[in-house]
Amino acid sequence: MTRLIDIRPGRGGRFLLGALPILALLFVYLLASEARHADNPADKVLPTFAAMAQAIHAFTTDRDPASDRVVIVADTIASLYRLGVGLAIATGTALILGLLLGVVPLARALLGPVVAVIAVIPPVAVLPILFIVLGLDEASKIALIAIGITPFMTRDLTSFVVSLPAEQFAKAQTLGANSWQLAIRVALPQLMPRLIAALRLSMGPAWVFLIAAEAVASDVGLGYRIFLVRRYFAMDIILPYVAWISLLAISSDALLLFASRRGFPWAHGAGR
């Protein structure tokens, strides 16, 4: 008798199984929205697919007055710029600190507690401080993303380096490797897949911090647009924007996974 745990669907089967819940949710939403609009044609809570299609046509054709770009394009470029720069700063900082704290016990004893303390501070709580210190421009939004995810990534990478077999470092030292060579030649190659994995896990919080910053002080961006139209209960705009953000997040995660599998196939077991 075949056990449930032994059933492993192929690529096509996984795609079909993954699509079924999404299609079911869309079907339930369709029924609910049609039922609400049958009772109240002016209902804004559950807009119909036709209403959302009209809204999508509007923000994919209308132009933003400030940038003279199509609204959705202007919002997407602004948000992706902030997100990309914030993630780049966080990734570079976490990589350097992770190597330093993981390879050098003295550095870990000195800086580890500071990183641990910063990691437990809610990043959104420091947003007013960032606005006061850095102003309302791009710097404060980028800083929130970097501050929000750097401590988590640093602790994760440090833990990974510390868990590497001590024999690897001992053999390298026997061959004359110094601390710099231990970090670059021994720890770094093994750390790179973990770095990408940590970045993938940080993408969700990074989007949250970005939307929060754009909602408070911005004149363009995906988060700004959502919080701008909420005062009008424009769910026909909010829902497509949320779907677009989800699509961007899924695409970036898939791209990172592809890069990890292509660059470091040895870190991905068969069948994963």
Image (tube, rainbow, N blue to C red):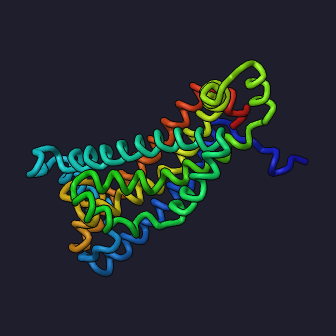
Quarter of the image for the C terminus: give it.
top right
Residue 250 spot, x, y in % from top left: 47, 46
Q: Is residue 226 visible?
A: no
Report which quarter residue 267 is drawn in. top right
Considering only vertical position in the picture, is 124 above or below 143? below
Residue at the image point whose x is 32% and y is 66% from the top: 129
Relative image position of residue 200 (x, y in whole percent):
53, 45
Q: Is residue 167 left or right of residue 208?
A: right
Residue placed farthest to the top in the image?
175
Residue 110, relative to residue 263: is it above or below?
A: below
- 266 lies left or right of 166: left
| Horizontal and vertical percent position of residue 73 | 23, 44
Q: How far across and how far down the image is residue 131, in percent?
A: 27, 63
Q: Residue at x 35, y 53 (%)?
A: 143
Which residue lies most toward the bottom here? 39
Q: Seen in the image, is 104 located left or right of residue 175?
A: left
Q: Nearer the viewer, residue 4 or 126?
A: 126
Query: Is residue 258 positioned above or below 49 on the image?
Result: above
Q: Residue at x 18, y 58 (%)?
A: 219
Q: Is residue 229 visible?
A: yes
Q: Residue at x 81, y 31 (%)?
A: 167
- Closest to the observer, 74 or 100: 100
Numbered marks: total: 0
